[in-house]
Image (tube, helix red, strand yellow):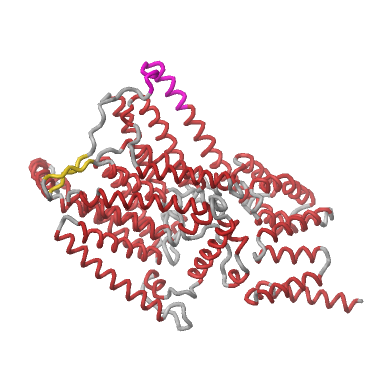
Amino acid sequence: MNPMDARLANAIRIVLVLVMVAPLIVMTDPLPRTLFPYVVGKALWSRTLIEIAFGLWIILVLRDSSYRFPKSWTLAVLGIYVLIALLATVFSVSPTRSLWSTFERMQGWVDLVHWFSFVVVLVSTHRTWAHWRTLLNFNLGVSIVIGLLGLTQFFDIQLFDYLQYKDRLDITLGNPTYVGGYMLVSFFIAAAFLAESYLDRSATETRGRAVDRRRRRRAQQSGGLSAIPEEHLWRTFWIAAIVLSLVMVFLSGTRSAAAALTAGVLAFGIGYAIWGGSFPLRKGAIAVTAVMAVLASVVVLIVLVRAGSDTERIDAPGAMIERLLNTGVRDRSVEGRIAAAQVGVEAFLDRPVLGWGPENYTVGYDRNVGPEVFARGTISFDQAHNKLIEELTTKGLLGLLGYLALWVSMAVVFFRVARHLSPSKQAFAFLLGAALIVYFTQNLFLFDTPSTVSHLYVLLGFVTFLEGMVLTRSGSEAVEVSVPPETTDRRPLLPSLSGDMALGAAALVVAIGTIAAIFLLNVRPLTASSQGVDALSDGLPWEQRFEAFEDSVGAFPSQSNYLRTTMFTAFATQWITLSDNQMIAATQLVSKHGPEGRNMEPDEWRLLNAMAAAYQRAADMDERHLVQARELVETAVQLAPSRIEVRLLLIVQFLFEGDNQEALRLMDDYMAEAPETAHHYEDLRVQVVKEIERQESGQ
């Protein structure tokens, strides 16, 4: 191999491994502040590194065609899924949102195609078990750091301002549910390494004897860690990762993680009991599976008998145990997820083929949700909190089938390949398969996030690696496993680029393209999000906030509607604090930027509500603004007829127009339709009735 190509391949591997650092990134002091600090930085960090790795990989492939991505059904299915998502984006109710998502989520098709590129480069450059061990062990190092930060948060050690202890740990991930999902996958990865190290005894003992001889000689001179066998140090590392992961899962109090842990253990136990090559580990897997099944049955029985009923809550030590034992269909979180699933299915029936478009679940949800849902405390769902329902609603039947096909293809790989591996590698692969089951199960209660999604695509890449392995049977029992030898054809991918000058020119083009992508896809959103923090800061004078708002929207318009909505709402709620000039400036900003946002997301009622509320306040300066508000409110009612916010704004519209009787009629009609919503209108209704009585008595 050309030394230059080897260095380039190693550089790509380093860049890819740094993607795993993303869960540690929080965009607040000492880093630059952004909107949604737990989300934006993680996504942009990952995208930037993926773009760099992809650019370097293009150069590497141009130099050495053996680094082409391997033939893989799993990779092909992933590509088809990405194409289905693109079709759903093109026919989306809001293509812009489907492409870019929001600052709060940072998903969308652009993010998906980045992760597809990540997998392509990953499987093209990680060709040996050693490559995967390095990547996965680095990931475990990150999880250990997260675990240690979690301990500082639990013991309320003020290492960073955002690590203040609450009832449950969120650490650097921003949500306890994300902590549970992330650390649980890390637990199974660490368990895979630990199991492999004990099963691979012959190689370990041979390696250990040679190492021990060298270490004993060094130990006589220096002592210390050099006297400890290398495998013991690694086992200590993996055990630390296992312990910290379980502790963080417990302290996160995440019920979905408990369900995912059960699913992962059962999947590994059943799979290994059937195909496992180590008899002692098979017995252990059966025993652990039986214990887990009994514990899960006990918890389910308690939940069915006690939790969610009218009986008193069960007090138990630890947020995890207490939340599990008090779970039931009357639990607000459970109610919300059930409602989100039901409404998601109804929305799917409206657009069954390609759905409402990626990241547009909220549009279908708000169009179909009934008022009784909000009476139970559910405020909003911009994600289904169930990946299958999310796919069905946002990408239609084609998207759901594509997503399920991806998981089926991975299952087929384990059935055809992993069950035939040598005992040590088989245990390793089966435990990583259990990690995939954990991720899938967790996402039945959640969705992909920048904090957790790297685990999915790394494990998917590992499955693709397994798929490309060559299995050679020796006799009836023993199985030899080998990685396909690298092709001897190392010519440039395109013969016309065989010359150094042509290859250099191609590399220059790729470098320019990579830099342009980083600026357009990452620097601009980062700048917009950072300036958006100033625009929404109550501590700054309004003139500075106006300027920051203009700069933020101009920096990256495609994700600016959150800022527009929040800013316009601030105008309405703080209108009396504005000077006359500031009122004029605020109204001008609504008139300028509102229609732009509306064109990008025509079905986003929140933006219409915010614009209407601002125009209602501005009607004191010009009555024509009240007419503008009326049109916006009526459109919002069509888009989200049962949203409490929309109904209240329509009532307020009648009050601004002086039609108190109609406002009262609307409130009574809404309460008759859904009596549970009465508490949303009580105070306002009392005021309206008093005003009507005052007017009547004055007459």
Q: Taking 479 as reference, is 444 left or right?
A: right
> Residue 470 colored magenta?
no
| Residue 619: quadrant of the picture | bottom right
Q: Which corner quadrant of the image does residue 117 belong to? A: top left
**What number of labels is visible?**
0
Corner quadrant of residue 268: bottom left
Range shown magenta: 494-511
Q: Quadrant of the N terminus?
A: top left
> Percent position (x, y) of residue 323?
41, 71
Residue 266 point in image, percent of width and height: 29, 64
**For the point 22% across and 59% down, which residue is it?**
272
| Quadrant of the drawing holding the C terminus | bottom right
In the picture, measured across the screen, residue 175 lies left or right of residue 355, that is left
* Residue 7 percent across, percent down from the top left: 30, 29
Residue at coordinates 36% horizontally, 74% vertically from top-left?
Answer: 300
Q: As displayed, is residue 81 above or below residue 183?
A: above
695 or 106: which is nearer to us? Answer: 106
Residue 12: x and y in percent read 35, 34
Asked whether residue 500 is drawn in magenta, I would say: yes
Most distant residue in the bottom direction: 311
Residue at (55% x, 53% y) in the render: 355
Magenta span: chief secondary structure: helix
**Residue 228 higher or lower than 634, as above or below:** above
Between residues 214 and 105, which one lies in front from this camera angle? 105
Report the side of 291 relative to 391 (left or right). Answer: left
Nearest the camera: 324 or 426? Answer: 426
